[in-house]
Amino acid sequence: MKYSSDIYKMPVSVVLQRMATDCKRRRLERGLSRKSLSELSGVPAPSIERFETKHKISLESYAQIANALDFTDELVSVMSKPKYHTIGELEAITKNKTRQRGR
């Protein structure tokens, strides 16, 4: 199903860049070095550096960093609620709520 919001989609590279920038901002706000965040999160400092500079990280490492920075609730709520832009999309979501498989 194609959603009306398709025209507003952001390139994945931009999403990853924004995630890395925000993560770095949160780290610096707390006065943490990459090494100290590494110790708190269990994610190697070079992985944190690669994320902040090249925007590459595993989902597991990202979750560990979010947990260390106390953003776990925000991370797990990202797709917790359905998102729709039209009544038709809402109707389709409602109809498919109990689906266990795609088509």
Image (tube, grey):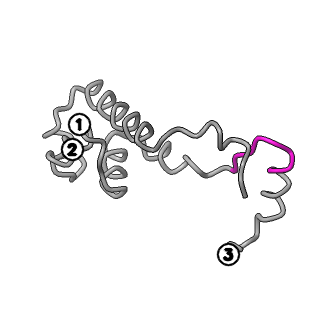
Q: Residue at x 16, y 33 (%)?
A: 33
CB within 8 Å, label 1 to label 3:
no
Q: Secondary structure at mark 2?
A: helix
Q: In this figure, which residue is indicated by the disc labeled 2? A: 50
The location of residue 48, given as percent across then percent down, is 22, 44
The location of residue 7, given as percent across then percent down, is 65, 39
**Segment tinted magenta in the rendering:** 82-89
Taking 96 as reference, is 86 above or below it? above
Q: In the image, 46: left or right of 24? A: left
Question: Spatial distance from mark 3 to mark 2, Cα to Cα?
Answer: 36 Å
Taking 9 as reference, is 3 above or below it? below
Q: In this figure, which residue is indicated by the disc labeled 1? A: 53
Q: Disc 1 or 3, which lies upstream in sequence?
A: 1
Q: Residues within 10 Å of mark 3 (few under 14, many from 20)?
A: few
Task: Please name the amino acid that badge 2 sits on.
Answer: Arg
Q: Magenta residues: mostly which secondary structure?
A: loop
Task: Please name the amino acid that badge 1 sits on.
Answer: Thr
- Residue 62: say if magenta: no
Q: Residue at x 30, y 42 (%)?
A: 55
